[in-house]
Amino acid sequence: MASELSLHGDLNLIVTGYIEPNRPRISRQLAQLLGMEMIDVERRIEERFGDTIDRIRAQYGEQRLKAIETDVMDDVALYRRALIRVSGNTLVNSGHLQEIQRNGVVVCLIASLDSVLRRIHLTLGARYHDPVERSLAIGELQREWKIRAAENVVEFDATYISEAELIDQIANFWRDLALRRG
């Protein structure tokens, strides 16, 4: 694994996108497989402020949340040889996308809308039938997928594959990228 990292020099692997509500698990497993430190931007924001992102947004507003995101992204941009899990919304709105791309490869996890809605339904259970809950989940999906319009973002479609297959595909992409750069 150490040799895999050295093949990439100082490149980061940036994982973003939305295929289900519990997406940190995929990044953790991928970081472990590739032997990379995982930096979870959402967790860093919550740790910095001492509350959840939803509560920060509800209590202090979007502007305060964006200020915290920008501060955390300033720090995250300094990392090298790490897997950085960051929301597409944060990448697009923080003003750090180009800087992050200079030091890494952005991988966006996607799935068909039907597949995402099915996964949201499974995660939310009975709450899925609450129009407010469903609307919040779909709104998050729309914000997350803004990153798909950016240049040089590599998409991995998880619609018809298992989580393990998705992780293997991204790991193989990372290894192939190292060989092409080497």
Image (cartoon, helix red, strand yellow):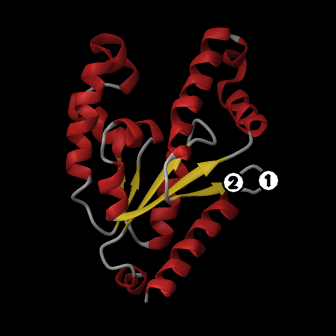
Question: Which-is-in-front pick, marks 2 and 1?
Answer: 2
The amino acid type of the residue labelled 2 equals Asp
**Element under label 1?**
loop
Residues at discs 2 and 1 in contact (Cβ within 8 Å): yes
**Residue at image coords 24%, 21%:** 64
C-alpha distance separating marks 2 and 1: 8 Å
Please, which residue is most extreme toward the bottom here?
182
Where in the figure is residue 93, as x and y percent of width and height?
A: 37, 35
Residue 3 sits in quarter: bottom left
Q: Which mark is residue 136?
A: none
The C terminus lies in quadrant: bottom left
Give the residue pinned by disc 1: 160
Residue 132 sits in quarter: top right
Where in the figure is residue 154, as x and y percent of width and height?
A: 56, 59
**Element under label 2?**
strand
Q: Which mark is residue 157?
A: 2
The amino acid type of the residue labelled 1 equals Tyr
Where in the figure is residue 45, as x and y percent of width and height?
A: 29, 36
**Residue at image coords 63%, 42%:** 19
* Position above or below: 36 against 20: below
Circle 2 Cα neighbour tier, 10 Å, few/some/many (<14 / 14–19 / ≥20)? some
